Amino acid sequence: MCLALCLAPAAARGAARWYAAAAATVIAVGVLPPALADPSGMAAHVLWFPLGLADVASPADSPLPGHLLAGLGPFGHTLALTALAAAAVAMAVSLIVRPPRGPRAAADRLALGLTPATALMPASRWGYLVYPAVLALWARLAATPRRTAPHPAAAPREEKDLCRVA
């Protein structure tokens, strides 16, 4: 996503730099310590389990396409992973061809990419669809202008005089 914002017009590049700095900070603080402490455990939890390639299968039952395809055996599992890879490639191409033009568009595009990813992962759960929904909702709430009450000192002089007790 950061790369897509960096490819955006010059007006959006400042926002892309702030986004990149925030993303790098989150990764450095939240991802790197566990990854350095136990790289194989991190890979097992973050990569192999969602892809249905871990030693332990997910106990959850899901009506999502990736889980249903994976339930058909090795061919279905391969088909689910192929569809997931195709969705990832399509998202990458869309980001390069038409980069998002701001934070709201970037959040929408991220939500649009997470939806098929969640649906096509072999070990995904129905509840994980809340993440793209929250991203899309957050983009709208963050873009809504906030109404603030006027500062009392900014009130017209006449109002101040009417409020005085004689």
Image (cartoon, rainbow, N blue to C red):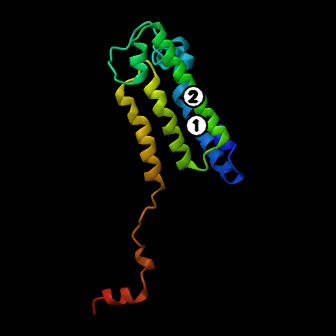
Which element carries disc 2, helix, strand or loop? helix
Q: Say which residue appears at 41% left-offset and 23% top-offset.
A: 65
Rendered location of residue 160, percent (x, y): 37, 86
N-terminal-most mark, 2 or 1: 1
Which element carries disc 1, helix, strand or loop? helix
Instruction: Please say whether residue 42 is visible from this viewpoint.
Output: no
10 Å crowding of disc 1: few (<14), some (14-19), many (20+): some
As drawn, the residue found furthest toward the left would be 165
Instruction: Please say whether residue 37 is visible from this viewpoint.
Output: yes
**Quadrant for the N terminus in the image:** top right
Q: Is residue 81 left or right of residue 160?
A: right
Q: Is residue 93 left or right of residue 124?
A: right
Pick whichever, 102 or 120, lies toward us. 120
Using the image, tell me which numbered label, if any, was put on residue 23: 1
Rendered location of residue 21, percent (x, y): 62, 40
Q: Which residue is mark 2?
A: 88
Above or below: residue 157 compared with residue 79: below
Tell me how far mark 2 sits from mark 1, CA to CA. 20 Å
Query: In which quarter of the view is residue 3 placed?
Result: top right
**Residue type, label 2:** Ala
Q: Say which residue appears at 46% left-offset and 22% top-offset.
A: 121
Pick whichever, 161 or 104, lies toward us. 104
Q: Is residue 6 left or right of residue 65?
A: right
**In contact (CB < 8 Å): disc 2 and disc 1:** no
Q: Say which residue appears at 45% left-offset and 15% top-offset.
A: 49
Using the image, tell me which numbered label, if any, was put on residue 65: none
**Residue type, label 1:** Ala
Rendered location of residue 152, percent (x, y): 40, 76
Rendered location of residue 95, percent (x, y): 62, 39
Pick whichever, 144 or 77, lies toward us. 77
